[in-house]
Amino acid sequence: MTDWRETNRALWDERVPIHVGSDFYDVDGFLAGRSTLRAFEQRELTGVAGATLLHLQCHFGLDTLSWAREGARVTGLDFSAPAIEAARDVARRAGLEADFVHADVYDAPSALGGRRFDVVYTGLGALNWLPDVERWAHVIRALLAPHGRLYLVEFHPLAHTLADDELTVANPYFHDEPLVFEDEGTYADLEAKTTPNRSVEWIHGLGEVVSALLGAGLRITLLHEHDHTLFQRWPFLERRADGTYHVPADRPSLPLMYSLVSCSG
């Protein structure tokens, strides 16, 4: 599809106000001090106080601003103008310093004026919106300062191969063609009335992502696969007190998310 970017942008532009007002994102809780970062992220990405951090595909900025609360000097970038406007508003209301830039991720080096960052952070439903991870990896390389770090957190591509109601393989793992969906509503509000509803997405295997980063001249220094996810991917998942969802003990364990650190020097 040649119009994939505009198709996806229209979908995200409409959903921004739904997400800002949703219980799922709980903006009031964030303004009261809640962090949106996962505990393993804070363990794996240390030393951010005083560092420059760029969050690619930042949506309306809650994760970006949570890193600001950890002491990072943050910049968020997203292709949705309403998302960037909402992020600036939340930053103002929270009293946090942040720079938010409206641009496509592939245009980030020029949109940011050649700036380079100590940390580039991205993930949790980001890579599936990009057709070309090799190009993305070279963008990351261009954005990293010497000895800078990429921190990527993503849903595991294996989970995309499984059916929605059971742990049976329903979709191919290796998939070169885009996947086109027509789904009303949004993960933050399943009952929301929405138009447009078409999205264009891609599945990128773990090996594809790692190879793209290595091909761009980056070093992999950490790769963790996680046995939990952040939403009710299947009806039988068990929710724990920390809000994470796990496969029950009587079923086979699966990798449901992964995190990766890649360095420029």
Image (spheres, grey):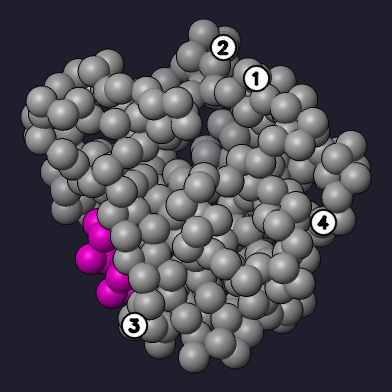
Q: How far apart are labels 3 and 1 at the CA level? A: 40 Å
Per the image, the residue denoted by label 1 is 22
Q: Nearer the viewer, residue 137 or 263?
A: 263
- Please say if the residues under marks 2 and 3 sit with CB atoms less than 8 Å apart: no
**Alpha-carbon span between mark 3 and mark 4:** 32 Å
Question: Which residue in the structure is indicated by mark 4?
Answer: 98
Residue designated by label 3: 215
Is 130 placed left or right of 211 in the picture? right
Residue named by callout 2 = 192
Q: Residue at x 23, y 66 (%)?
A: 207
Bounds of the magenta segment: 203-212
Q: How far is the residue under mark 1 from the one under mark 4?
A: 23 Å
Q: Is residue 17 visible?
A: no
- The secondary structure type at the circle numbered 4 is strand
Which sits in the foreground, 40 or 204?
40
Kind of residue at disc 4: Ala
